Image: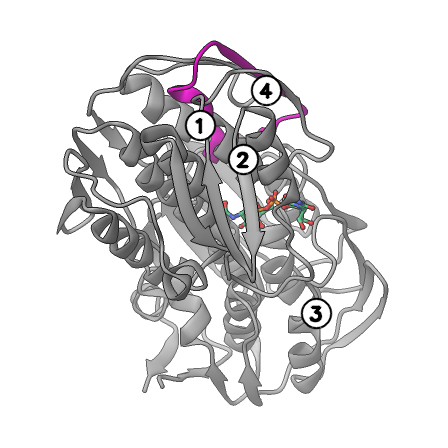
Amino acid sequence: MAKLFIEGGRKLKGEVKLQGAKNSALPILAATVLTADESVLHNCPCLTDTETSIKILRCLGAKVNRHGHTLVVNTKDISSDSISDSLMRQMRSSIVFLGAILGRCGRAKLSFPGGCELGPRPIDLHLEALRQMGTEITEHHGELVCCAPKGLNGTKISLSFPSVGATENIMLAATLAKGTTVITNAAREPEIEDLADYLNKCGACIYGAGEGTIVIEGREELHGTSHNIIPDRIVAATLMSAAAVTGSDIVLKDVIPSHLSAVIPVFEEAGCSVSVKEGIMNIECPERPKAWSLTRTTPYPGFPTDAQAPLMAMATIAKGTTVFVENVFESRYKHIGEFLRLGANVKTVGKVAVVQGVEKLYSSSLQAQDLRGSAALVVAALSAQGVAEIDTTKYLDRGYEDFDGVLLSLGAKIQKI
Ligand code: UD1
């Protein structure tokens, strides 16, 4: 098992081109199942989660070849409608294959997905919507046997919460369904728009992605296409936090500023100067950030729950007190226990965390417990005095491509052993 050793207190300098977004790449890889053709996906990050999607595609009968960050996926010969429990358990996103396989084959057999433990992560909204579209689902000892004997039918689906995964699953199932599907209270994340862009290039008919109501007119068939995955806004927020905790100036390339509209103002309130021109972000940070008033996580376009942990790392050393309210997941504060080991001052009551910034963190041995929390531990360690040892790679490599290499290129003292 690999560990990261980080000697904190070094300033960062240089440029980084953002990787492609994990949360776009995963549903788009699932969507290729709907095409029975070849898709070429550019800017696809090299992560353990994308590798899991590739393994699932191959088990279904697809041919997948990687050339650097370009994946060529040929789904002509899909021969299976089942995903094994061991693959399903490797990540939460395995569940978006359900809508795609149902759309292509009219039936699917898989189990409940795994993924980071952020509290209960039910899939009731996914299953209820697919039932409304004509799917019969039997659950038996964690296995889901799904079948649409009369085909999938478009219908009106109103989500009680704008779930990202449920919105994606419905879009995937609706693309080849009979008639029109209307999703209200749909998730509006940029990754939803990216999925719709890919599917529309394949011949699908999806309107309104990125808004609260999405309309999908079912099509007979789709064809292949080529598509560029959007840049990863959460990796951007993480690197911005790394710059802020080290009082550094760095440059991020391939940034879409509108995707960070809830994040950039927090850095500005913390005293950083942020400018973005033609996709190039310059962030210049003071020696020590200022605390900011409040960060409440909410579905997009609100502050992203995935950026909560990295920004909390910044709050631990900020001048003053910052309050966080985590509204999306029940149990997304596991990094706080590790921050305390570094000397941070954080108190939690339910979904509220109050962070009283300290002047310095002191290194310690740390254990990551989820993907974004592990990135937050790396950010905190970059500012801490001494050498921190972080057992993180199992999680970090799921979402951050070569993160130690990226930080090394910016001048951090970091080693993976
Ligand atoms: C996606 C992202 C994840 C991000 C999250 C919220 C991917 C691969 N992952 O996860 O990084 O943190 O959106 O922005 O894109 N819920 C239910 N029932 C359901 C589905 C969801 O109660 O059927 C609840 C969840 O428990 C959670 C909330 O809705 O409390 C948000 O979940 P959802 O938007 O579905 O997140 P994911 O798609 O799992």
Q: Which residues are magenta?
A: 173-192
Along the viewing direction, whichever of 183 and 277 lies nearer the viewer: 183
The crowd level at tag 2 (other Cα within 10 Å; few <14, some 14-19, many 20+) is some
User: Tag 3, which secondary structure?
Assistant: loop
Q: Badge 2 is on which residue?
A: 136
Is residue 189 a member of the stretch shown in magenta?
yes
* N-term mark: 1 or 4: 1
Mark 4 C-beta closer than 8 Å to ligand 1 = no
Q: Badge 4 is on which residue?
A: 211
- The residue depicted at 52 percent of the width and 70 percent of the height is 374
Residue 102 in sight here: yes
Residue 230 in sight here: no
Q: Horizontal placement of 190 versus 307: left or right? A: left
Residue 35 lies in quadrant: top left
Give how far apart the Cα atoms at labels 2 and 1 are: 8 Å
Along the viewing direction, whichever of 411 and 151 lies nearer the viewer: 151
Q: Horizontal placement of 76 versus 409: left or right? A: left
Q: Badge 3 is on which residue?
A: 316
Q: Nearer the viewer, mark 1 or mark 4?
A: 1
Q: Amino acid at mark 3?
A: Thr
User: Tag 4, which secondary structure?
Assistant: loop
Residue 219 lies in quadrant: top left
33 lies above or below 353: above
390 lies above or below 166: below
* N-term mark: 2 or 1: 2
Q: Badge 1 is on which residue?
A: 149
Quadrant in the picture for the N terminus: bottom left
Q: Horizontal placement of 207 versus 303: left or right? A: left
Give how far apart the Cα atoms at labels 1 and 4 are: 32 Å
